[in-house]
């Protein structure tokens, strides 16, 4: 159809004299757009499939456990709140591998970044919005199953004080996990603009490091050096979270022989986690210093 | 009123000097920024957006200092980059709405302005389809739309005609003209094609090697750069029609050149400088007198390098020509009118020696 036939009438150019909401508003908009994008909302139907499936897979065990607990009138949930994310870490890794590149690599690959930086938004705002968006997306993924468990536990009339304490500890743990994992995954994706590489690299870093650490821990356990087990946990993201919650959040360690770090070693764990989060934030800022225009 | 002002603006990187003591004032309207690749055009835009610190000197955009008011400047200007910058999997509408919000427009205003702007740049039903399926021309329109969506006072367009076919180019140039005449937005447009900007811009700034080569209104430029390309048929009487025309024109005191571009049919085109309207009449009469068919007579678009080159060559060519006296007089007259620019242009021609040798 020729363009002319679709043009009903030309009302001429109108100037915009409404409000311009500036930097903070733009940052919030970028945050909400990225958060929605992490679940495929506001994007094509195809890009909704994977995040939604993974979200379902993440929640399904919680629903089953709750159903069992209610049906059998058990006096405790089959799994601790803090343990849930550790058990389902493979799902978390998959989700991150799919969504972290989506969050940052697209803008880099299609060179959309200069369009952001030619607007009031600054580099810091961009990095913060993206970091916060992916962390929030991951928090939703990990916290919703805990809410399911908690509501189920209350329905099964389990001890209220006990469950609330466990639930709160679980929430703190997954919040920390979300920020730490998002930071690591974002840095990896931001340096690998090719999407396929980004996915592979995120999976590799998250799962290979865990595989290596738990293998060496198992060997250490065989040889009876329990001291080594707790220090080895510093070398993969998921064991870091495990260590922190064992030391401070009343969790039972998933390390071989349940040899979690003591409170003293736990401080080191917390420091390493915080350093990694700060480090990945700094690395992202550095990455975008070069990407502007 | 000055839209852009720079004062001995320099930008040096460890190895190269991108801008060298550039001082200029640009008023409202459409301004062309011309320079070869690597002349410093993109660096200048980056500095004017407040994204890159200057090594020395100052620059102001819309009266705001780039060093201190980058954010305010970026709220009031639009930028269309040279390279591809569109994600393929979203529609033009979604993308431009998002960019409008990034400029600080509230959600409802962002949608309204997006619909308006896309219509103004000539995107209709296709704006709901993913950008990945667009032609280059449509993509350029989306890029222009995202630069205009927040109703800026000034837009920077970096090589907006890149990759477009001749029709697409003309449409884009017309659109750029309208951005100023109809929308009232000042434009700074870069290109390495001077001829393209002559027709679109009120004012042209030429930079080379980071230096200001020339800054003048377009009418000044057109006087010195209009080249006519004439192509004629051969007849029984004149088996070499092109040669006959050339000889006849030289007899009337008009210097000609052959089209040395090495393109197909190059040997059959006669190039000459159009001094005034009479030149056109003269060519018409000469062709008619010879009894040849006039295939085409058109204004030739110049590549920026050619402007310098042809100027330089004309001076050297005058002497050995058959109509020597008149030709060199002609060259002298030309030199007179362009006296101010002559020196810098010769310098530029020397810098571009590579191109000259190739010819």
Image (tube, helix red, strand yellow):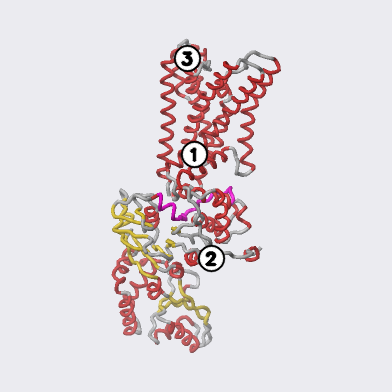
Given residues A199 and A48, the one toward you in this image is: A48
Secondary structure under tag 1 reads helix
| Residue B257 lies in the magenta-colored region | no
Towards the viewer: A39 or A75: A75
Question: Dot 3, crowdedness within 10 Å: few (<14), some or many (≥20)?
Answer: some
**Left or right of A202 in this view: B24:** left
Chain to which mark 1 belongs:
A
| Residue bearing mark 3 | A220
Q: Position of residue A293 (x, y in %)?
A: 43, 50
Residue A191 visible (yes or no):
no
Q: Chain of mark 2?
A: B
Q: Which mark is residue A122?
A: none
Residue B120 in the image: x percent, y percent?
55, 61
Residue closest to the far right: A71
Q: Which residue is mark 1?
A: A130
Badge 3 element: helix
Magenta segment: B71-91
Which quadrant is home to the N terminus of chain B? Answer: bottom left
Q: Which residue is mark 2?
A: B171
**Subunit bearing disc 3:** A
Residue furthest top as drawn: A224
Which is in the foreground here, disc 1 or disc 3?
1
Asked if the residue at tag 2 contacts the one at tag 1, i.e. Cβ–Cβ closer than 8 Å, the answer is: no
């Amino acid at each position: 159809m020729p363009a002319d036939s679709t043009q009903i009438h030309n009302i001429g150019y109108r100037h915009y004299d409404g409000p311009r909401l500036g930097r903070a508003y733009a940052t919030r908009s970028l945050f909400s757009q990225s958060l929605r994008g992490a679940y495929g909302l506001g994007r094509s139907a195809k890009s909704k499939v994977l995040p939604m499936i993974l979200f379902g897979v993440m929640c399904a065990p919680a629903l089953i456990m709750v159903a069992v607990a209610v049906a059998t009138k058990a006096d405790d949930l089959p799994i601790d709140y803090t343990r849930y994310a550790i058990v389902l870490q493979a799902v978390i890794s998959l989700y991150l591998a799919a969504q972290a590149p989506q969050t940052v690599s697209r803008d880099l690959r299609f060179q959309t970044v200069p369009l952001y930086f030619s607007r009031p938004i600054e580099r810091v705002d961009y990095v913060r919005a993206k970091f916060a968006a992916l962390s929030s997306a991951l928090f939703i993924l990990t916290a919703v199953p805990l809410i399911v468990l908690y509501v189920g536990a209350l329905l099964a009339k389990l001890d209220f004080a006990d469950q609330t304490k466990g639930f709160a500890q679980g929430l703190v743990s997954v919040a920390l996990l979300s920020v730490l994992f998002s930071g690591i995954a974002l840095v990896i994706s931001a340096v690998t603009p090719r999407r396929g590489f980004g996915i592979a690299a995120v999976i590799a870093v998250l799962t290979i490091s865990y595989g290596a650490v738990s293998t060496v821990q198992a060997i250490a356990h065989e040889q009876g050096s329990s001291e080594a087990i707790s220090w080895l946990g510093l070398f993969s993201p998921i064991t870091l979270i495990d260590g922190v919650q064992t030391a401070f959040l009343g969790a039972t360690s998933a390390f071989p022989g349940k040899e979690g770090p003591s409170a003293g070693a736990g401080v080191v764990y917390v420091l390493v986690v915080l350093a990694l989060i700060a480090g990945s934030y700094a690395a992202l800022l550095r990455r975008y210093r070069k990407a502007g225009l | 009123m000055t839209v852009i002002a720079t004062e001995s603006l320099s930008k040096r990187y460890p190895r190269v000097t991108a801008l060298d003591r550039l001082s200029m004032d640009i008023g409202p309207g459409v301004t062309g920024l011309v320079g070869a690749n690597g002349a410093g055009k993109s660096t200048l835009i980056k500095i004017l957006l407040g994204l890159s610190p200057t090594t020395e000197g100052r620059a102001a955009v819309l009266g705001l200092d780039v060093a201190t008011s980058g954010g305010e400047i970026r709220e009031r200007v639009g930028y269309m980059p040279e390279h591809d910058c569109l994600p393929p999997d979203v529609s033009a509408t979604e993308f431009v709405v998002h960019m409008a919000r990034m400029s600080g427009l509230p959600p409802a205003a962002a949608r309204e302005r997006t619909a308006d702007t896309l219509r103004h740049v000539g995107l209709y039903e296709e704006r709901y389809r993913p950008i990945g399926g667009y032609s280059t021309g449509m993509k350029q329109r989306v890029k222009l739309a995202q630069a205009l969506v927040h109703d800026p006072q000034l837009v920077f367009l970096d090589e907006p005609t890149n990759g477009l076919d001749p029709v697409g180019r003309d449409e884009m140039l017309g659109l750029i003209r309208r951005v100023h005449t109809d929308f009232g937005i000042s434009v700074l447009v870069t290109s390495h094609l001077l001829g393209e900007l002559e027709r679109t811009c009120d004012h042209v700034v030429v930079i080379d090697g980071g230096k200001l080569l020339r800054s003048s209104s377009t009418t000044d430029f057109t006087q010195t750069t209009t080249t006519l390309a004439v192509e004629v048929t051969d007849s029984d009487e004149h088996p070499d029609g092109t040669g006959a025309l050339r000889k006849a024109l030289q007899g009337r005191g008009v210097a000609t050149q052959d089209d040395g571009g090495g393109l197909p049919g190059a040997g059959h085109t006669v190039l000459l400088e159009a001094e005034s309207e009479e030149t056109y009449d003269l060519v018409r009469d000469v062709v008619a007198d010879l009894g040849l068919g006039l295939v085409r007579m058109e204004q030739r678009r110049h590549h920026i390098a050619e402007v310098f080159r042809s100027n330089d060559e004309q001076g050297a060519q005058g002497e050995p020509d058959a109509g020597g006296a008149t030709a060199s007089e002609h060259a002298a007259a030309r030199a007179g009118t362009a006296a101010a620019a002559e020196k810098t242009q010769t310098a530029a021609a020397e810098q571009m020696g590579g191109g000259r040798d190739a010819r």
